[in-house]
Image (cartoon, helix red, strand yellow):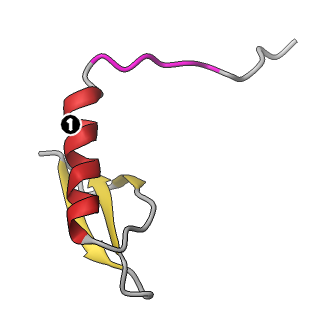
């Protein structure tokens, strides 16, 4: 099962990581001074990303 994990970094700020069902970290967040801010970011991702567009900004190899 996919999950978000909230943790404190070495500077004492809050971060989160998104993990796949196999335990692999898929992405990590920026740091937040308040835990509530990290939680709000997670909720925003959950709410706004189901139909997210994928934009490929790489050039095709010639």
Which quadrant is the N terminus positioned in? Answer: top left
Work out whether residue 3 or residue 14 is closer to the camera in this orientation and state it: 14
Which quadrant is the C terminus positioned in? Answer: top right
Measured along the vertical axis of the image, is residue 51 above or below residue 5? above
Is residue 20 in sight in this rendering?
Answer: no
Q: Secondary structure at mark 1?
A: helix
Q: Which residue in the structure is indicated by mark 1?
A: 46
Q: Residue at x 28, y 72 (%)?
A: 34
Say how many tags the image has.
Answer: 1
Measured along the vertical axis of the image, is residue 27 above or below residue 52? below
Give x and y (percent) for residue 13: 37, 79
Give x and y (percent) for residue 28: 40, 57
Q: Residue furthest right?
A: 62
Measured along the vertical axis of the image, is residue 16 above or below residue 33? above
Give x and y (percent) for residue 10: 43, 87
Is residue 8 in sight in this rendering?
Answer: yes
Q: Residue at x 20, y 64 (%)?
A: 36
Q: Residue at x 25, y 40 (%)?
A: 44
Work out whether residue 23 or residue 52 is closer to the camera in this orientation and state it: 52
Measured along the vertical axis of the image, is residue 32 above or below residue 49? below
Could you say which quadrant of the image residue 58 lies in? top right
Q: Residue at x 31, y 62 (%)?
A: 16
Could you say which quadrant of the image residue 56 lies in? top right
Give x and y (percent) for residue 4: 21, 55
What are the residue bounds of the magenta stretch?
51-56
């Amino acid at each position: 099962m996919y999950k978000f994990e909230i943790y404190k970094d070495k500077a004492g700020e809050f971060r989160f990581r998104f993990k796949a069902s196999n335990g692999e970290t898929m992405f990590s967040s920026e740091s937040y001074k308040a835990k509530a801010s990290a939680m709000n970011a997670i909720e925003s991702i959950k709410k706004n990303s189901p139909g997210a567009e994928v934009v490929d900004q790489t050039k095709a190899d010639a």
